[in-house]
Image (spheres, coloured by chain):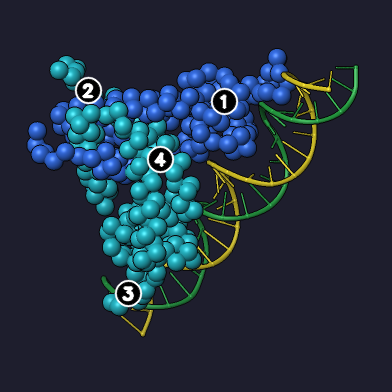
Chain colours: A blue, B cyan, C yellow, D green
Amino acid sequence: MSDLKKPSRFEVADRLHSAAIHLLRHARKQDALAGVGPARLSALSVLVFGGPMALRQLAAAEQVKAPTMSRIVAGLQGSGLAKIETDAHDARRIRVTATAKGERLLQQARTRRVQQLAEILSEATHRDLDTLLRAAQLIEQVVKQAADRKQ
Amino acid sequence: MSDLKKPSRFEVADRLHSAAIHLLRHARKQDALAGVGPARLSALSVLVFGGPMALRQLAAAEQVKAPTMSRIVAGLQGSGLAKIETDAHDARRIRVTATAKGERLLQQARTRRVQQLAEILSEATHRDLDTLLRAAQLIEQVVKQAADRKQ
DNA sequence: ATAATTCGTTAGCAGTGCTAAGTAATAGGA
DNA sequence: TCCTATTACTTAGCACTGCTAACGAATTAT
């Protein structure tokens, strides 16, 4: 109960936006250790958890235009983190796949990021953690709903 | 009723990380409309809500190195969104201030961002909003504590 | 007075976003 | 079938954002 005020959606959205930015800035520090930029790391994550896919799909998943993803994939390929094959049914398409090295690197980077955030949460009580967990679940839920509404 | 399980810091960090990424991907779309890059917009926000400050302070607030902030401020100045004065007590320092134009632009961008996220929250109940607001406050708090521990 | 520190800038690199324009392959219609 | 339109990806070139290294100027400490 604590707060008597009923927060407006606008107020919540604004504070949530700010909090998310500040939170991710801390996680970002660890990314430097991976030796791979954030866009490549994020795309690699999609490949590892979503499986091989065409460039256009990958671009859509990352909400980025095709030329941008083309360069990201080229970078991943150059580092040996992903490989490109041509589609058997459509020679225009490519099939991007994470390599074993890519999967290994992603897991390490992911662990570092999460541990960095866990460290930040060291002052949080169990009650706080419960609130944060429920908030994270809510966010995933409403974001998914919003994405579904679009298509 | 919620959950009987006590969430670990690691688990909370992991879900929070994922939620923050997905949330910000939606907000990012609106930022393009401002005609000002995200780093400049964010720095301008600090100036508007935190008042005039030295470059070093601003860099610290944005968790960015001095040369990066130097360029961001130069960009803001070039667009007439901020102005630079010399500090009266210490001639090495500069005093960065948001202009009226900067404040106006920030408020517009802020409104767009907030409306975008508020739309996403359209399905959330008052109870959900309360959870999200408290989570946002907690995040800001622990991030601030982490930043203070460093210096 | 001199040395060390602090503040900000400049230069140069890498990465990431975009649009415009080009190439190659596929799909569709006359 | 052949010609056109569409789709998939790449290339080129721009702007923005992050970094380190190296510099000049001002302040602080010895």
Residue A57, disc = 1
Q: Are marks 4 and 2 in contact (CB under 8 Å)?
A: no
> Along the polypeptide, which appears first: circle 4 or circle 2?
2
User: In the picture shown, does residue B11 fall above or below A116?
Assistant: above
The residue sitting at 22% across, 37% down in the picture is: B133
Secondary structure of the residue carrying tag 4 is: helix
Which residue bears the numbered disc 2?
A: B7
Tag 2 subunit = B
Q: Where's residue B122, x and y in %?
A: 31, 32
Secondary structure of the residue carrying tag 3 is: loop
Nearer the camera: disc 1 or disc 2: 1
Nearer the camera: disc 3 or disc 4: 4
> Residues under labels 1 and 2: Cα distance?
34 Å
Which residue bears the numbered disc 3?
A: B87
Q: Are marks 1 and 3 in contact (CB under 8 Å)?
A: no
**Type of amino acid at the residue the image marks with label 2:** Pro
